[in-house]
Image (cartoon, helix red, strand yellow):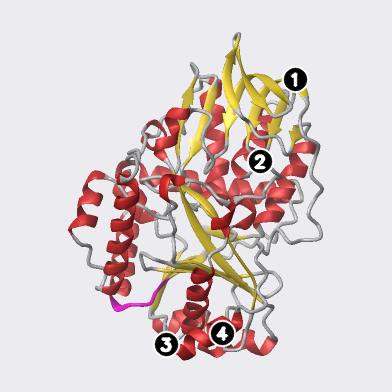
Amino acid sequence: MAPVAMRLAAQSLSDAQPVPFWLEDPGKPAALPALTGTEKCDLLVVGGGYSGLWTALLAKEREPSRDVVLIEGREVGWAASGRNGGFCAASLTHGFGNGLARWPGELPQLERLGERNLDGIEEAVARYSLDCDFERTGEIDVATEPYQVDELHEMYEEIERLGLADGLELLDRDAVRAEVDSPTFLGGLWDRRGVAMLNPAKLAWGLKRACLDLGVRIFENTPGLELLSVGAGMGVRTPYGRVVAARVALGTNVFPSLVKRVRPYTVPVYDYALMTEPLSPEQLASIGWKNRQGLGDSANQFHYFRITADQRILWGGYDAIYPFGGKLSAEMDHRPETYLKLAEHFFRCFPQLEGLRFSHAWGGAIDTCSRFSAFFGTAYKGRVAYAAGFTGLGVGATRFGGDVMLDLLAGERTERTELEMVRSKPLPFPPEPIAWAGIGITKWSLARADENGGKRNLWLKAMDRVGLGFDS
């Protein structure tokens, strides 16, 4: 980073508060009391992020008389669900390319189910009056290097060949800059309907209220400590009591699964984001962005960025930090060297916004798996179901995961449970120190590919062949 650019980036961060912007909201609901003693229920949901909230809500929609309890280790939405970028995508496969590489035979079906799932989220927002700034404005994948323009064209041609290009539009340099003006943009692929923007914390809080209104009993500051069989049902021990349930759905994602054999399938990755102060009308006019789409560049080490309801820009991504041993730590929630790097990248993308300042800077852990998209399963003879590994694309896909878990717990054969994606598992990550070394080599290789016209080295090609990857 040049000294002048570094100085300007540092100055832009001088007032940034080290807290997630979304969670610093005066409308944040008060925490509910912790569970004490013994509670009994039909279904226990462990985890108060999107995965658990959608599962509890869908369970009550399917069977209103079902007694559902949800426990959350801290407060609803405090982790990844309340600190992400607010991109709610239809894709269940972490994008078309990943889906095509892994499940080519059922990709049209997966795309259709993903669209139906996003429609279901939009309907729930309306039905339950979820005040979460939901805007179905789509997303543009932006090319910032010539080879990325070629890759976007090849991707569009493949999508068109499969008859899935409805709502997609290729944009040349002038067209993409007419949407959002950056001198770094060389082209783009606009998915007009497949992504919505929203306020992630408000979505979590709205789902909490909707669950309560339907009769779900929610206990916060109540971590699940141990899972064990209790007669014909299951029990989960908590700090001040326990819950006995006929069935259990685990939505703990990045946190260690109560089913220990599931743990090797995920590793935590720390992702970081900046939020600007609100743009003035003049600043907003200088970049356009009248259609308010989400954007993401096409590099391996990619940035994602969007505009908020109050005209701020969220700018995140690029660094994906894996802590040795996969240990979660509050200290990892902040990384000044990454904030500085992100700020410099921001002003390279939008030089016309020089002088704009960042109001917030934060990070958080994402559960990633080697196939970049969720996996599912059961334990304890079908009495426990789990979904995990959403790899940063869980704002929308967790609702689908909730439906899958409920299908599995009911023992039902459905279109969802028959999917190869649902029936198969990703490759587990190796133990330490092999995981640390492998992830480090992979990150280095991805950075080299970005610098070398997208050309993947022998290491990445080998990882591609065996289906292993690392992403956030």
Earlier-in-chain disc, 3 versus 2: 3
Chain-order first, disc 4 or disc 1? 1
Mark 1 or mark 3: which comes first in sequence? 3
The residue under label 4 is 287
Helix, strand or loop under label 4 = helix
Label 1 SS:
strand
Residue highlighted by disc 2: 48
Magenta stretch: give its range.
142-146
Q: How far from the left and from the top, in percent, is residue 305?
A: 53, 69
Disc 4 crowd rating (10 Å Cα; few below 14, some 14-19, many 20+) is some
Element under disc 2: loop
CB within 8 Å, label 2 to label 4: no
* Image location (x, y in percent) of residue 178: 50, 83
Which of discs 3 and 2 lies nearer the camera? The answer is: 3
On the question of residue 215 being in view, the answer is yes
Q: Nearer the viewer, mark 2 or mark 4?
A: 2
Residue count near mark 1 (Cα–Cα under 10 Å), binned few <14, some 14–19, many ≥20:
some
Instruction: Please report the residue visible at 68 percent of the width from the left and 61 percent of the height from the top.
Output: 22
Alpha carbon separation for disc pair 1 and 3: 61 Å
**Residue 286 quadrant:** bottom right
Q: Position of residue 192 (x, y in %)?
A: 51, 65
From this viewpoint, which residue is outermost toward the left?
Answer: 458
Going from N to C along the chain, the mark reached first, 2 or 4, is 2
Mark 3 or mark 4, whichever is nearer to me: 3
**Left-right relation of 402 to 177:** right
